[in-house]
Image: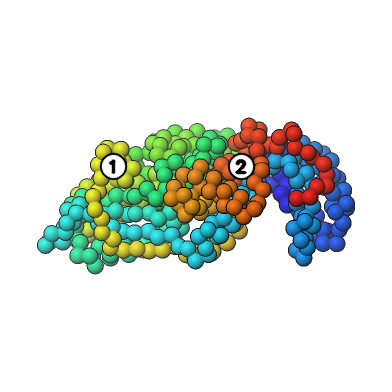
Amino acid sequence: MVLRSSSTTPRGVLVAGICLSFLASLAKASPESVIAEMEKIQGESGLRSAQLGLCLIPLEGEPDDAFGYQVERGLVPASMMKVITTATALEIAGPDYRFTTAIEISGEVDEAGTLNGHLIIRGGGDPTLAESQIASTFAKWQSSLAEAGVNKLNGSVVGDASIFDNQMLSDTWQWNDMGNYYASGANGLSIHRNLFYCTFRTSSPGARADLIGTDPKLPGIKFFNEMRVGRSGSGDQGYIYGVPYGKVYYLRGTVPADGRSFTIKGALPDPAFFAARAFTKHLSENGFEVTGDPTTIRLLRDAGESVGARQIIHTQTSTTLGSLIKETNHESNNLQAECIHRLIGLEQRDQSSISSSSSATEDYWKSKGIDMTGFYMADGCGLWAVAIQHHHPAATGRDSLPHGPIRKC
């Protein structure tokens, strides 16, 4: 069942408050009584302008026994899109699939242990890489260099996110979502959940909330702080405005006057570059000299350069896809859903773009005999919902579709 408000509920929140008691009453209900209850709900003052619909399939019945309410109305699924994404990936890649990250070297290692070339962190699309234990992850990577006989790098640490294309965000995502942690998008070399923490000093309501700093630090990024202090108990109403690969962030909204400081989370503008820079810093602070500046495959290609032939010296894998999917759906994790979405395109089309992954999803279920009429997939996590609900016919429903109360699904 999908219940959604397109005009009375802000920011694509599912209208779910009525679900528990309503679903509990369905076990012994007739189709007519279910529809009557839906019509009653639709008539409530807070939901009159909402779009409601459901499809019910008896667990012990046949597919033809399914029935629903306004089943042909196009509804924006919001985060329920994750169910489509994860189910498709589970079918295509299997529950035991694991994302793999590799540490590679290019060039030659001389007798003194100096690598005259580059050290490459080749991302495999793992959304959980160093999500919390970044220092221990870096320590393992440095140990792999020692095992390969390398004690100095006469070159650069290079972040390679090229398993995915360079478009991290869907074209349909909203400006006030971009820059915030839940809209970090898919990167082939995601790290530390692609987020940073932004802490403000709070005082009296209405005053400016001074920016204390970010963790981790983001050198080269300019922050324009317009954040204010909200009333006590007002919660996190702060937003970070920025774009992938950008150098400027705007901080707007309010943070509550509930203490001396308050922290919100933002999206790293370039996770692959952050990984290269952070690992360079780790090496330099742990007795391993690096002569070159950190960079990425994207930047090198833009400059017409390449790293040459590579040799793998270390690999590490994620947990199983089955485990990731469980967490993705239970926690409604957008980053994981986006990376899993790109996996579909890679497996089916050998392409990792949003469009190829979405079309591969649709084609897969068509091949299973599923009618995909009205299906529209602009991303893997459903964050696109609010942005296009009034603009795309598949998101709002077409006037020619019948809207009768009881129809076969």
Element marked by disc 2: loop
Q: Is residue 275 above or below residue 220?
A: below
Specify whether 68 is left or right of 394: right
Q: For the residues labelled 2 and 1, say whether their Cβ atoms are less than 8 Å apart.
A: no
Residue 15, image x, y percentages: 72, 46
Residue at the spot of label 2: 376
Residue 128, image x, y percentages: 46, 58
Q: Residue at x 41, y 63 (%)?
A: 317
Tell me which amino acid carries mark 2: Tyr
The disc at residue 300 is 1
Specify whether 361 is left or right of 317: right
Q: Residue at x 38, y 54 (%)?
A: 123
Specify whether 51 is left or right of 87: right
Tell me which amino acid carries mark 1: Leu
Element marked by disc 1: helix
Res 184 visible: no
Closer to the observer: label 2 or label 1? 2
Q: Residues within 10 Å of mark 2 (few under 14, many from 20)?
A: some
Res 121 visible: yes
> Which of these two is toward me, 208 or 146?
146
Seen from this angle, which residue lies furthest left?
111
- Residue 66 location, quadrant: bottom right
- CA–CA distance in space, label 2 to label 1: 35 Å
